[in-house]
Image: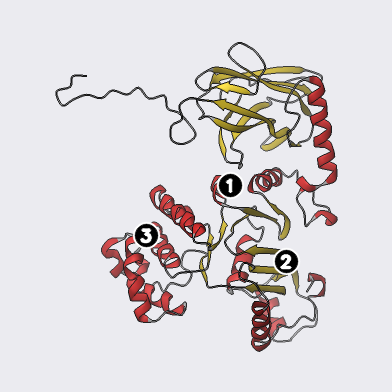
Amino acid sequence: MKCGAIRGYHRNSMVRLSIERKAWFAGMEQEEIAIAVDNVCKVYKLYDRPMDRMKEALGLTRKKKYREHFALSNVSFDIRQGECVGIIGTNGSGKSTILKIITGVLNPTGGTVRVNGRISALLELGAGFNMEYSGMENIYLNGTMNGFSQNEINERLQDILDFADIGDYVHQPVKTYSSGMFVRLAFSVAINIDPEILIVDEALSVGDVFFQAKCYHKFEEFKKMGKTIIIVSHDLSSIAKYCDRVILLNQGVKLGEGLPKDMIDDFKRVLVGQYELPDAKSEQSLLQDAEVQEAVLAKSAAQKKAGQGDSDSKTLEYGTREAQIEAFYVTDDRDIRTNAIMKGAEFTIHMRVRFEKALPAPIFAFSFKTAKGTEITGTNTMFEKAFLESVEAGAVKEIRFTQKMSLQGGEYLLSFGVTGYNGNDFQVYHRLYDALDVTVISDKNTVGYYDMDSKVAVCDASGED
């Protein structure tokens, strides 16, 4: 059902929904869709005064006393079994609302949601827990709510207690728990009831770094077991690392879905207010837009002709164009242009920027990402306190960042940016994502992204080498 047809919409009876679900599941194959969201809308009535709500509820007025707020507007997507899908967007974009509709906490105003599998959800602190009960009592309460018998809960109890690791506090009332203890217990219950679909909404952000690492390790186990995972998080690095696909929402509208790197790049455009959303493009990523692709190809051709940049780069660029990055390249320790750098060697990142308008204290920046889109490192002239001056219209600046290459051997993507502040407002003048691919050549890789260049000494107990 489209949102335009919401007026006059009446919820289907539970019997009808049950019949529809059974018919839908019967037609599914083993490897088919775990969750299907079809044109889902959620509309809230906003009243200026509580009295207006009461008058309407009692039928004392025929005049419309509310205005409609669309928390979700015709959102559709499918999640296949075994996928790990991230949902990202700014605050108020509808992320938590769609999760609550999927789990049955909220009913949609329009559209349908079909779920194939047992869901375990960690939506927010306090959901499904009785604050007066002890942790142990809440374990049995949640297990019973999820359809487990007492014997089945007993079989899983030790695993729940071991993962939560809150000691004797499990026998104390939940209302006495810290937020960290609470999320430990809630997450432990959620993942140990053998769910086929796990949904987590930002709840892990209150856990300490060790608990978060344990949770993400569990995600990896779940993925190998073929379970379906949905994660809502503002931690874009985790989204890029763990998710197979990402859905981007903004103000209740799905802007796009696709590879994590692509959607994260689009999300960054949303954050700075430079993602235009014509009605005809509300169901696709700008990365699939013909005009954007045409501009990318044109720039790649220009770079190839000039001998700069990467001719095969799928660069995403945007900004006000009050300043424009005209050239960008990398040189090695011999001042030779190259895309291959030896690990441990000094290298320089170059930018040339032309200013179409006088600007106060522009900021020049670069950053390295993995092929999956995880940002690793980067800096800018503001952090380095290297350039805090205003520039005049028509000026051209050459910027050089020189440093030692400490990244592990592999392939990386290099992005560039020119930004600044207009009063208190952050402005993006020109930003180029994934403009160059850089290969780091190494004969010794250590753990992680960086080599700390450790000096090792092994001594016997007497202290002699």
Give residue 75's quadrant in the image: bottom right
Question: Which numbered tag is attached to residue 181?
Answer: 3
Question: Which numbered tag is attached to residue 240?
Answer: 1
- 11 vs 148, nearest the viewer: 148
Residue 450 visible in the shown view: yes
Q: Amino acid at mark 1?
A: Ala
Residue plotted at (40% across, 77% down): 141
- The residues tagged by marks 2 and 3 sit, at their Cα atoms, a distance apart of 36 Å
Nearer mark to the viewer, of 1 and 3: 1
- 380 vs 339, nearest the viewer: 339
Assign a secondary structure to mark 3.
Answer: helix
**Going by the image, does 218 lie left or right of 267?**
left
Question: Which numbered tag is attached to residue 69?
Answer: 2
Rendering coords of residue 12 (x, y %)? 70, 84
Q: Amino acid at mark 2?
A: His
Q: Amino acid at mark 3?
A: Met
